[in-house]
Amino acid sequence: MYRQSMNIGVLRGYLCVTDDTRHFDIWVMKEFGCRESWTKEYAVDTASHVGRLLDGPFKPLQILGDGKILMIWDDRVLVKYDPETKDFRFLEFNGVRSLDKVVLYTPTFVPLKDVLMVDNLTVRNMSTRYEPAFLVNIFL
């Protein structure tokens, strides 16, 4: 993996790292601070079933209850990847040009605007029958 092609995130509460190549792996640190606990959880071939090469960075957001992985591709497109069938599904939102400042949000009793201390944000309901998820786009 080249350092400039790596993304870091959190999946199921574990630190994760991806590299941005035609075929990328999702590595998860199962025990925080323990170098030996890194485990390759997924291997993703971006050209497997879409008929074209998906070049650019992938940022995993969440593993859904059905095992599919919600990711952002190239800071612009929301993608749902099925590790079993190797299929990609592209999800679109009208009026959203960039997803580079998108975060996953689980609702609490504290208003999101108070937590983030911003006035300009948009919350998109991404709830599925498996588990609730919200995407928050912050306009700074």
Image (tube, rainbow, N blue to C red):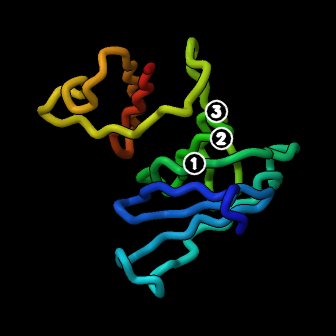
Q: Residue furthest top?
A: 95
Name the residue carrying label 2: 73
> What type is the residue that disc 1 sits on?
Lys
Name the residue carrying label 3: 77
Q: Is residue 23 above or below residue 126?
A: below
Front-lying residue, 96 or 90: 96
Q: Are marks 2 and 3 in contact (CB under 8 Å)?
A: yes
* Label 2 or label 1, whichever comes before in sequence order: 1
Q: Secondary structure at mark 3?
A: strand
Q: Is residue 85 visible?
A: no
Q: Residue at x 71, y 68 (%)?
A: 1
Name the residue carrying label 1: 59
Front-lying residue, 13 or 48: 13
Q: Position of residue 67 (x, y in %)?
A: 50, 57
113 to the left or right of 80: left
37 to the left or right of 77: left
Q: Secondary structure at mark 2?
A: strand
